[in-house]
Image (cartoon, rainbow, N blue to C red):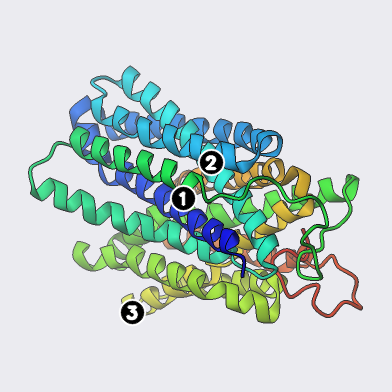
């Protein structure tokens, strides 16, 4: 294997870990920032929407810049901006300054998210085998790193601002150091293609496929967002589990998702991206249905584990599909799919919350069953290569391209 390609592979891992760590650092400091600014939970919820809007705008901007300037330029710049802006929420003293800080940090995070996924598409194309899910697994590892470092900093008596500044400085340095190993630019169309990375021709069909991929990403990531915010409350409020036990609901879901992403690339290489999306979404549908209907805590844990395991490979395949649809527009296509998916993730908790006015919390999860079932039924979008090509649908790139 070419040494420069291996270095680019490692550098891409660095940026995914970096993104997960910086986002995780902000998340674990939310309570402290909320107390410092002196706002209510409701006001904080509105400010988090500002962060989401900033991320959405950043995704759209970075996608186009990545196609014009190359991911090698966009990714390090976004990483530096993300690291530098991390300290700002910790310094905010009122809702207005916090809103501005979150808008900038969200914008930087959106730029980094799309830029690193666009670069990951080019690395996967050069490797001629699936690697996207492994990158997404390391994003989750970054969140764990952030939680451990934040706990150590708190125990040492550091303020949130000092901790965020230190992590931001380390992140900025990592972004700059890893930049030299990124691929120099978008590989010319067809340069590294084979049956594992053949994309459909550009045009109306490709644009329609991107819209379908974006809709699927929205459904999958809405399901992820709902699990993030409601899994622990489900065990506590519906099944009556102690708070200490209920906390493990999200941990079970997140651990299953991380393990699934670590294994997904091998499964894709053997059975194809379409199979991972179809059977993964179907598994998630079974898992969340069990969770919604069971009266037993142990069965709920099993349901959340199946839900996380099933969803684990879905988003990487959709991002990979979008990026490979047109190598010259990988960044733009990834930004469209990731952007709509991100809006779905933001909407998920709110949608479930609204439905609780109509029915019990556990029964609202049946909406997620419907979304996962619809995703499984539409997974054929990833089968686009000619039927006579036996390797064409055994890859995340066969149709077509980072929380």
Assess disc 3: are there few (<14), some (14-19) or many (≥20) residues with their C-alpha within 10 Å of its C-alpha.
Answer: few
> Where is 6 relative to 96, above or below?
below
Assess disc 2: are there few (<14), some (14-19) or many (≥20) residues with their C-alpha within 10 Å of its C-alpha.
Answer: many
Q: Indicate the quadrant containing the N terminus: top left, top right, bottom left or bottom right.
A: bottom right
Q: Secondary structure at mark 1?
A: helix
User: What is the distance, in whole Å, between disc 2 and disc 3 at their CAs?
Assistant: 43 Å
Q: Is residue 195 left or right of residue 63?
A: right
Whole-percent x, y for residue 253 in the image:
40, 67
Give me the disc on residue 15: 1
Q: How many marks?
A: 3
Q: Nearer the viewer, residue 395 or 210?
A: 395
Tell whether label 2 touches label 1 (CB within 8 Å): yes
Give me the disc on residue 75: 2
Residue shown at 67% from the left, 81% from the top: 270
Assess disc 1: are there few (<14), some (14-19) or many (≥20) residues with their C-alpha within 10 Å of its C-alpha.
Answer: many
Give me the disc on residue 374: none
Hey, which quadrant is residue 242 in on the image?
A: bottom left
Q: Is residue 86 left or right of residue 222?
A: left
Residue shown at 29% from the left, 31% from the top: 87
| N-term mark: 2 or 3 | 2
Q: Is residue 97 visible?
A: yes
Q: Nearer the viewer, residue 12 or 89?
A: 12
Q: Is residue 393 left or right of residue 367?
A: right
Q: Which residue does the numbered mark 3 point to in the structure image?
A: 298
Residue shown at 44% from the left, 61% from the top: 138
Q: Secondary structure at mark 2?
A: helix
Whole-percent x, y for residue 338 in the image:
61, 46
Whole-percent x, y for residue 324 in the image:
74, 55
């Amino acid at each position: 294997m070419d040494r420069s390609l291996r270095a680019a592979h490692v550098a891409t891992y660095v940026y995914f870990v970096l993104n997960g760590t910086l986002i995780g650092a902000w998340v674990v400091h939310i309570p402290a920032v909320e107390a410092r600014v002196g706002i209510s939970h409701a006001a904080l919820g509105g400010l988090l929407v500002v962060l989401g809007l900033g991320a959405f705008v950043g995704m759209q901007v970075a996608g186009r810049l990545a196609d014009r300037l190359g991911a090698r330029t966009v990714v390090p710049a976004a990483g530096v901006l993300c690291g530098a802006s991390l300290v700002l929420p910790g310094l905010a003293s009122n809702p207005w300054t916090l809103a501005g800080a979150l808008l900038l940090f969200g914008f930087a995070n959106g730029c980094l998210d799309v830029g690193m996924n666009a670069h990951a598409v080019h690395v996967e194309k050069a490797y001629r085998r699936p690697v996207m899910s492994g990158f997404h697994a390391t994003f989750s590892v970054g969140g764990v790193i952030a939680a451990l470092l934040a706990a150590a900093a708190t125990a040492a008596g550091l303020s949130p601002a000092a901790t965020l500044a230190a992590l931001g400085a380390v992140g900025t340095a990592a972004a700059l150091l890893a930049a030299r190993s990124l691929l120099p630019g978008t590989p010319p169309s067809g340069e590294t293609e084979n049956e594992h990375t053949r994309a459909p021709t550009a045009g109306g069909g490709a644009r329609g496929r991107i819209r379908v991929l974006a809709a699927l990403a929205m459904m999958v990531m809405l399901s992820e967002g709902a699990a993030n915010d409601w899994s622990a409350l489900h065990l506590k409020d519906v099944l009556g589990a102690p708070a200490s036990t209920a906390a493990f609901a999200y941990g079970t879901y997140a651990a299953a998702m991380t393990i699934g992403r670590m294994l997904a690339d091998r499964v894709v290489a053997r059975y194809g991206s379409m199979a991972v999306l179809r059977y993964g979404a179907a598994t998630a549908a079974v898992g969340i249905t069990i969770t919604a209907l069971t009266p037993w805590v142990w069965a709920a844990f099993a349901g959340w584990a199946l839900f996380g395991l099933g969803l684990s490979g879905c988003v990487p395949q959709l991002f990979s599909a979008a990026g490979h649809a047109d190598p010259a527009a990988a960044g733009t296509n990834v930004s469209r799919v990731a952007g709509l998916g991100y809006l779905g993730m933001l909407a998920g908790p709110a949608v479930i919350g609204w439905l609780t006015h109509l029915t019990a919390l556990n029964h609202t999860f049946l909406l997620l069953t419907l979304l996962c079932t619809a995703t499984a039924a539409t997974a054929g979008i990833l089968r686009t290569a000619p039927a006579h090509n036996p390797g064409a649908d055994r890859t995340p790139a066969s149709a077509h391209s980072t929380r």
